[in-house]
Image: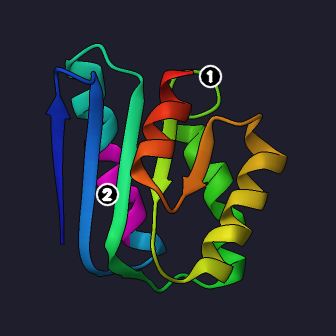
Amino acid sequence: MYSVSYNSDEHFVYVVTTGHYSIKDTGKFLRDGVKLADKNNCTKLIMDHRDCEFTASYLEINSIAKYLNSLGFGYKYTGAVIYNQDHEKYDFADTVSQNWSSGVLRFFDDIEEAKKWLLS
């Protein structure tokens, strides 16, 4: 499950997931997040996966970059992913993102660091 909300004080869209999610779920919550961002003239998204298990394989993680590009990450949106488990998978996803995206998507285990990075 997930929720999508806009915080007007911070000018961020928040996507918060619970339970578990797969690569297929990523598309739905990212599309909903981008729609809400566009509605609010916002380009920064925080994806909070601290209460969620990421079930994607490493091969699927490697393909996420192409999908993100189709949504506008890389030229329009900047995103921060927050996590507190599955460090090996998220570290791999961060490496994939850095190799692909010129730094428009980063992975953090501290939400304040993520916000600071998005505002920089």
Secondary structure state at the residue bearing disc 1: loop
**Which labelled disc corresponds to residue 28?**
2
Residue 72 visible in rendering: no
92 is higher (above) or lower (below) than 118: below
The percent position of residue 71, horizontal first and vertical second, equals 49, 38
The percent position of residue 120, horizontal first and vertical second, equals 57, 21
Q: Main secondary structure of the magenta part?
A: helix
The percent position of residue 50, horizontal first and vertical second, equals 35, 70
Gap in angstroms between the C-alphas marked 2 and 1: 20 Å
Label 1: few (<14), some (14–19) or many (≥20) C-alpha neighbours in 10 Å = few
32 is higher (above) or lower (below) than 41: below
Asked whether, in this view, residue 8 is left or right of residue 112, the answer is left
Residue 26 colored magenta? yes
97 is higher (above) or lower (below) than 25: above
Q: Amino acid at mark 2?
A: Lys
Residue 15 visible in rendering: yes
Residue 108 colored magenta? no
From the image, state whether disc 2 or disc 1 is nearer to you.
Answer: 1
Q: Which residue lies at the image location 34% right of the left edge and 58% below the top edge? A: 48
**Which labelled disc corresponds to residue 75?**
1
Asked whether, in this view, residue 26 is left or right of residue 113, the answer is left
Q: Which residues are magenta?
A: 25-32
105 is higher (above) or lower (below) than 3: above
The percent position of residue 17, horizontal first and vertical second, equals 26, 67
Number of numbered discs overlaid on the protein picture: 2
**Image quadrant occupied by the N terminus:** bottom left
Q: Nearer the viewer, residue 53 or 31?
A: 53
Asked whether, in this view, residue 74 is left or right of residue 102, the answer is left
